Amino acid sequence: VSSPDDHGGVFTTSGADAVTLLGDNPPPPSQLYDPKNRFIPQCFFFCAQSLHLGLASSSNFHSGLVRQVNHTAWNLRQRNLDVQHDPNFNHILTMQYANETSILSPEMLGDSLRFCNLLAGFLLKIDDESLPRMPEHFVDDICEILSFAAKYASKEMAGIDLGNVFRAVVKLLSPKYAYAVRNYNIRAKLGDVLHEVFLPPSSTDKRSSVPSSVSCDPIAGGQPYLISDSSAQETLAPSLLLLYGEVEQTGYYDKMSYRAHIATLLQYLWESKEHRPAFRRITQKKESFIKFANGIMNETNSLIASVMEKLPEIRRVQLQMANSQEWSALTEEQRETMTSRHEENEQQVTHALPLCNRTLQMLGFLNTDSDIRGLFLLEEMCPRLANMLLHVLTKLVGSKGLELKVDNPESYNFRPKEMLRDLCAIFATFADAEGFQIECAKSGYYNNELMVKSVKTCSKLSLLTGNSMDEFSSLPSKIETAALAVEDDEALTQDAPEEFIDPLMCTFMKDPVFLPTSGNIIDRSTITQHLLNDPHDPFNRKDLTIDKVQPATELKEKITKWLNEKRAAKNAP
């Protein structure tokens, strides 16, 4: 790979067609490659290149053909045309069948998978200096071929050892080797390989059933690699949390699919006692976990807003299409415009809802841990959490809930009962936290009728049982009590001096801090929350990090003294 003499001209190393390397501009090798036998390594690199130009390329082409076949058939059915006798559809279908004849050959596919495992073993053993100089397509091809085989020929994978692939994926995703694979799309594909190939199927899984001989380690008594591998136990949970943020750099629809898969993997690891120590270590890195949690809430708010806007539009068009008289009264141009918009809405909802569902589930299981729950109850996180949960609850249970009742909701991955169950379970988890009760009371999304209705709906449908249901049922009265305390505090600080008021949020400051970049004073919770989404001073856009802000000690003392005097005056007889 380092020079034409080393690899025998297999790779183009200069010019516009130069092979892309894993690392970002890796330095030249400190020691030249000088094997005792050049023939065997050359055969290895020739085979890797042929796999790249052959099966990896063909599998990608085949996936595109399958999407084209499905989309063409759907379009024809929407226009009430005969799919079976459409010449264009049959031409594409013939291409798909012809392609499958070669690329789904059991012998070729089996040999290719075995070579992928050999290639992964090579990536495991190569020294850290040389790893970033390996061709990027080595990793990309492994991901492409394994994901393809899992989707279209899972039975042919039976009995093939892919242990090296698993260990290589864990290694390349780990924070230690993040420098070696800088292409975010390839890092995302590594996560997909874990999900498609090595995650044992569940009863609600729609994935192709990969044989357990692939996902389980025979040396560990047939346990899944995800559970038994020591490297995975050490690094995989933090690696997946890191990857969840990294996939933001991929495409809009791609990132939603990647994140839904990552959330599923995290839930599987969470349920394993072998991975609990790694999750506990994650909570010790407070800043990085808060960034991850903030990202989850940002995305959930965005996705829910988009989905809940588009579901009523989908329902409206479905009703129009079902009314043949009303639909036929429209011009052909109007029908085409509406159909195109309808398809776009369906696509966006179908891609967004799996991630919405998985994100709520992830918030639920993570917060069963008291340490993680404590991080969500921090001043910079709790208001965001309460607003996000109440926002989703308003959309599901509020007055416009009937507009969400689309035909065949399962086809859009829309499961409102499951979504409400997961949401209410999160509320129940935080029901005893006084800070959460107060933030719910402060939220503009809160109203008592909504909470009471949610409790009744949850009880009627038996979405929660036992202690969880009791905790959720107690929440409306606790929030009402908290609302009285909030009113008292607001009345107490109503005539507060201007210098005690946060300049951004116009709220009474509890912990004022000085921003050295602009000279302004602001509440710590306000600037902390701001910097989670934007690393700049909000007053002059200069770079700013939370460690640079300084306590405004003198002002805090004045605030404390003023509050004590106000309370004393209020309580005086």
Image (tube, rainbow, N blue to C red):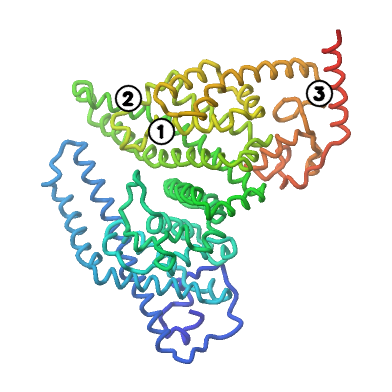
Q: Which mark is residue 418?
A: 1
Foreground residue among 391 and 358: 358
Tell me the distance, in whole angstroms, between the alpha carbons under discs 2 and 3: 50 Å
**Secondary structure under badge 2?**
helix
Q: Which mark is residue 316?
A: 2
Please identify, in this view, whether the residue under mark 1 or under mark 2 is nearer the observer.
1
Please identify, in this view, whether the residue under mark 3 or under mark 1 is nearer the observer.
1
Give the quarter of the image for residue 430. Answer: top right
Residue 143 location, x and y as percent? 40, 62
Residue 163 vs 431, above or below: the answer is: below
Residue 147 vs 360, above or below: the answer is: below
Residue 348 vs 113, above or below: the answer is: above
Closer to the N terminus: mark 3 or mark 1? 1
**Secondary structure under badge 3?**
helix
Q: How many marks?
A: 3
Q: Which residue is mark 3?
A: 498
Tell me the distance, in whole angstroms, between the alpha carbons under discs 1 and 2: 24 Å
